[in-house]
């Protein structure tokens, strides 16, 4: 039940820092339930991006939000994943995304361009009443006090905005995370540099060997030692996206880059000597790539809510995803659905603490496990040469030729925990079992004890 059709009895002012997938999704869900939402995004609507896999747990949310027909305009249904040798291009195995298996999940496995997801969510959020400010940079964040718990932010132009709640959806290098943790977030290299490219499909159609990929409904993977490549069509097959995964300085390419999606990297500087000719030609069709460095956070992000209880983390700010994984966007949207669903039940300020605690409790463990699955899958297709890689290839060849009811059952069992999840149901189950019976929810307040900013207060700070 991803759609919230409930108007909260008490509406709040929310500031959302970050207008990516998570920020726009939570803006939509909160605005739809009657809250006043303003999103602050330092970049514009159109930024460099690549492709996203949309697993069933996310596609069923998007389908409920925009409908089947609108979703078909921007997404391609993935029918399977061919596994190739990166060196030779030979087919090693094939994973069928069988309709019977997908039907059991309630969704489909889709392929989309990241910017198309952003545009869908932006339209939803603004039509629901949220305000989205692009090219708006936050330079500092102020926590509330015991007397006035409302958080505020200072913008680069000197304006100060205050709200009842602040959501940090500002990505990997989150400014809000450091406020919540009350210490500098220390990140260390995680052993992977990711390169992202997008190619005009018309160029691929001119190449007889690349043409089938441009026309396919597949998410293709090429496996090599300490290096892998994946790709699939986006934008109704007008473009083709690819990722290059470079591991541990062992594939002839130095690790580098930042933990973001901002750095453009010249394609000519990427070492592609170990790639088969088809993949080399594919990569060379784009003059520049986006370089992203996978970083680990050894201290973890144990707390998603600050000491005041009014600042909350969401998406990559709360649980930095694995770049190039299949579940980063879906985890952010699930976060948004859970948080928004909980706050649709708000009728008094005393409920905020129980709602934010429930949000972290419902989301944290799942996000950790899904990230580990993404990392394991990426490492599996980039094994160094040796017995393990040979055993993997042999297993894939066997499975390719032995699809039966038993294999279908095994595949469903492997993916059920991730794909069957319904974020709205998780939030509503908590509310039915716990939230509506909490002491604070039963109390009848004599007065609403908070400072009400009917519209976001804007104060210009001068130097005098």
Image (spheres, rainbow, N blue to C red):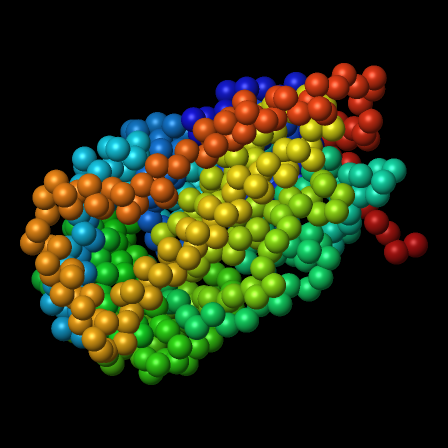
Q: In this rendered view, identify the residue nearer to me: 1 or 245.
A: 1
Q: Is residue 369 above or below residue 1?
A: below
Residue at the (44%, 77%) spot, across then down: 255
Q: Quadrant of residue 254?
A: bottom left
Tell me, yes or no, if residue 336 can be seen here: yes
Residue at the (57%, 53%) spot, across then down: 317
Tell me, yes or no, if residue 214 can be seen here: no
> Where is residue 169 drawn, in percent x and y?
58, 48
> Where is residue 370 drawn, in percent x and y?
41, 51
Question: Please, which residue is most extreme toward the right here?
Answer: 464
Horizontal side of 115 relative to 459 (left or right) equals left
Horizontal side of 402 relative to 391 (left or right) equals left
How many discs appear? 0
Residue at the (57%, 46%) spot, across then down: 314
Quadrant, the N terminus? top left
Horizontal side of 15 relative to 324 (left or right) equals right
> Where is residue 24 drawn, in percent x and y?
52, 40
Q: Quadrant of residue 291?
A: bottom left
Horizontal side of 195 relative to 436 (left or right) equals left
> Where is residue 112 drawn, in percent x and y?
33, 46
């Amino acid at each position: 039940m991803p759609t919230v059709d409930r108007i909260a009895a008490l509406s709040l002012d929310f500031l959302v820092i970050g207008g990516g997938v998570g920020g726009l999704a939570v803006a939509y869900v909160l605005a739809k339930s009657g809250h006043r939402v303003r999103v602050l995004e330092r970049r514009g609507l159109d930024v460099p991006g690549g492709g996203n896999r949309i697993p069933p747990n996310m596609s069923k949310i998007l389908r409920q939000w925009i409908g089947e027909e609108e979703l078909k305009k921007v997404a391609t249904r993935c029918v399977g994943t061919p596994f190739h040798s990166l060196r030779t291009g030979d087919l090693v195995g094939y994973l069928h995304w069988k309709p019977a298996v997908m039907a059991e999940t309630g969704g489909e496995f889709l392929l989309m361009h990241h910017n198309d997801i952003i545009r869908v969510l932006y339209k939803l959020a603004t039509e629901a009443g949220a305000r989205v400010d692009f090219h708006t940079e936050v330079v500092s964040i102020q926590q509330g006090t015991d007397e006035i718990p409302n958080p505020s932010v200072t913008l680069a132009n000197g304006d100060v905005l205050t709200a009842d709640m602040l959501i940090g959806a500002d990505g990997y290098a989150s400014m809000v995370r450091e406020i919540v943790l009350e210490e500098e977030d220390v990140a260390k290299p995680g052993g992977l540099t990711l390169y992202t490219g997008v190619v005009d499909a018309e160029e691929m159609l001119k190449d007889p060997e690349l043409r089938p990929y441009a026309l396919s409904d597949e998410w293709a993977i090429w496996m090599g030692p300490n290096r892998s490549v994946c790709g699939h069509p986006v934008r109704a097959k007008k473009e083709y996206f690819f990722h290059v995964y470079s591991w541990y300085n062992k594939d002839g390419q130095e690790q580098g880059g930042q933990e973001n999606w901002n750095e453009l990297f010249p394609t000519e500087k990427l070492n592609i000597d170990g790639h088969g000719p088809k993949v080399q030609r594919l990569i060379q069709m784009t003059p520049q790539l986006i370089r992203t460095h996978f970083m680990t956070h050894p201290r973890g992000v144990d707390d998603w809510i600050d000491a005041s209880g009014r600042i909350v983390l969401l998406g990559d700010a709360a649980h930095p995803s694995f770049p190039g994984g299949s579940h980063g966007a879906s985890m952010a949207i699930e976060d948004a659905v859970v948080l928004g669903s909980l706050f649709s039940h708000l009728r008094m300020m005393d409920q905020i603490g129980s709602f934010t605690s429930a949000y972290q409790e419902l989301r944290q463990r799942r996000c950790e496990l899904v990230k580990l699955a993404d990392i394991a899958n990426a490492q599996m297709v980039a094994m160094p040469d040796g017995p393990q890689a040979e055993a993997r290839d042999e297993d894939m060849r066997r499975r390719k030729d032995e699809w039966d009811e038993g294999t279908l059952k095994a595949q469903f069992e492997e993916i059920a925990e991730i794909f069957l999840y319904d974020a709205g149901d998780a939030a509503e189950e908590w509310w039915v079992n716990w939230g509506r019976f909490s002491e604070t929810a039963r109390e009848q307040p004599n007065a609403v004890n908070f400072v009400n900013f009917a519209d976001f207060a804007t104060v210009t700070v001068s130097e005098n």
